[in-house]
């Protein structure tokens, strides 16, 4: 699993596949930019018939490059998979002068070979332009990567070669000249120039084990690309981490500021409440002293009066205020507070005038009541509000 993640991270999601077509006097280039999206491969851009200058203007240097060599100087053969088969192909030449690109199919090998100096010169050209060449293919047999995509036998034109595919393998090939055939794969329509490039990009992301290329010509290129890719990933992760830490710090700072404001408000409210409590305690003590001096601060008597009034209230009436011994006059600085010890002030609501008048008469019959005065009786739609003063004997 870790190796798979590392492979995805270092390969990236894009590959620039460059077709290098050798001819007698010049080199023609074909270009295809592919992107891997989950398990799908999408062609972003494709061009053909480019010269070197135009190609280097089109291909971004940050995208890894996959080179596909075909044309003059590339020899394609089908041989038996047996020891020493290369000697029979190159005759009296040195094996060290060639690169062999092999596709193993049961007992046969489909091989493409090209001179090393011819291939190395192109790789060097791309390296000088700061491109990272991470893979290469020689000849048309990279078409085997497309074989599993066809349900029945298919003739795929790759450059000047027709490769016959059947049941996921190569079953034959033949050289042709200027044969045009379009290959449709999903939403992509590929001509003879672009078909092997698409096969190469497919092999890059989903390697075909039948393909063998056992040379370290690109070892340094791949190592350098992996180093650059790792450095870029590390830089991106570091940058993301920095901004994430910055965002977290900002959010935490806002949270702490909000908490500080809440605590500050609580402290202010606590201080204000404390001052109010202190004032109320002082006021309570002052009133208790005043009441004691009046001689009527008798809890039993006050409780008796409250109980008498409360128990007498009928169900049609509801009290809003019951004040025993209200203030006699306004409080003035430097003067004792005077209470009216002969009066009870009552305010409330009644839904029945009959019940209200009956209650007035009932209260007038109490032994401790001197008289009951109706101060106010106001009517509205559903109920009446009243104010009554009861005078004590």
Image: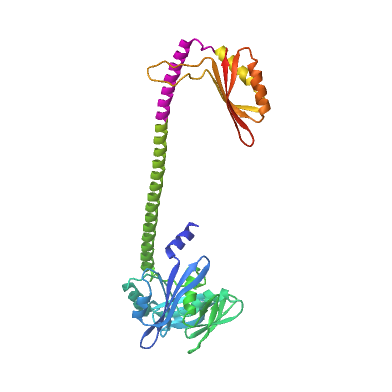
Query: Which residues fall within the magenta stretch?
Result: 270-298
Vertical position of residue 259 compared to residue 190: above or below: above
The residue that appears at 37% across and 83% down in the rendered structure is 27
Q: Quadrant of the C terminus?
A: top right
Residue closer to the observer: 79 or 201:
201
x and y percent of residue 325 in the render? 52, 17
Report the residue at 57% width, 16% height from top: 391
The image shows residue 251 at horizontal and vertical percentages of: 41, 47
Front-lying residue, 136 or 259: 259
Residue 336 seen from this side? yes
Q: Quadrant of residue 317?
A: top right
Instruction: Give the quarter of the image for residue 154.
Output: bottom right
Q: In this rendering, would 169 be left or right of 269?
A: right
- Residue 76, horizontal then vertical, whole percent: 47, 82
Q: Within the magenta stretch, is there residue 80?
A: no
| Residue 139 picture location, percent across and down | 46, 80
């Amino acid at each position: 699993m870790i190796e798979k993640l590392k492979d995805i991270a270092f390969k990236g999601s894009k590959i620039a596949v460059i077709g290098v077509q050798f001819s007698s006097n010049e080199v023609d280039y074909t270009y295809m930019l592919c992107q891997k999206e989950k398990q799908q491969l999408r062609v972003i851009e494709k061009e053909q018939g480019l010269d070197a200058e135009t190609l280097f203007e089109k291909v971004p240097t940050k995208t890894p490059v996959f080179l596909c060599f075909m044309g003059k100087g590339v020899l394609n053969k089908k041989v038996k998979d047996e020891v020493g088969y290369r000697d029979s192909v190159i005759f009296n030449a040195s094996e060290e002068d060639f690169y062999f690109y092999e596709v193993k199919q049961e007992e046969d090998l489909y091989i493409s070979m090209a001179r090393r100096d011819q291939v190395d010169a192109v790789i060097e050209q791309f390296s000088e332009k700061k491109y990272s060449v991470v893979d290469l293919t020689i000849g048309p047999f990279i078409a085997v990567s497309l074989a599993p995509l066809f349900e029945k036998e298919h003739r795929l034109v790759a450059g000047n070669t027709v490769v016959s595919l059947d049941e996921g393998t190569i079953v034959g090939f033949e050289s042709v000249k200027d044969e045009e055939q379009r290959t449709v794969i999903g939403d992509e329509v590929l001509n003879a120039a672009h078909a092997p490039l698409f096969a190469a990009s497919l092999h890059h992301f989903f390697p075909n084990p039948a393909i063998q290329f056992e040379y370290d010509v690109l070892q340094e290129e791949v190592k350098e690309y992996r180093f650059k890719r790792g450095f870029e990933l590390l830089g991106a992760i570091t940058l993301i981490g920095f901004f994430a830490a910055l965002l977290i710090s900002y959010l935490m700072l806002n949270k702490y500021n909000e908490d500080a404001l809440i605590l500050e408000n609580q402290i202010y409210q606590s201080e204000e409440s404390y001052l109010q409590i202190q004032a109320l305690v002082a006021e309570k003590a002052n009133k208790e002293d005043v009441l004691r001096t009046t001689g009527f601060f008798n809890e039993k008597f006050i409780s008796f009066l409250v109980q008498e009034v409360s128990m007498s209230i009928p169900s049609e009436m509801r009290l809003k205020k019951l004040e025993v011994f209200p203030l006699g006059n306004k409080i003035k600085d430097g003067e004792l507070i005077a209470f009216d010890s002969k009066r009870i002030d009552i305010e409330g609501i009644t839904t029945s005038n009959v019940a209200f008048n009956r209650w007035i008469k009932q209260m007038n019959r109490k032994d401790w009541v001197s008289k009951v005065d109706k101060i106010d009786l106001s009517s509205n739609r559903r109920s009446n509000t009243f104010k009554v003063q009861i005078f004590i004997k």
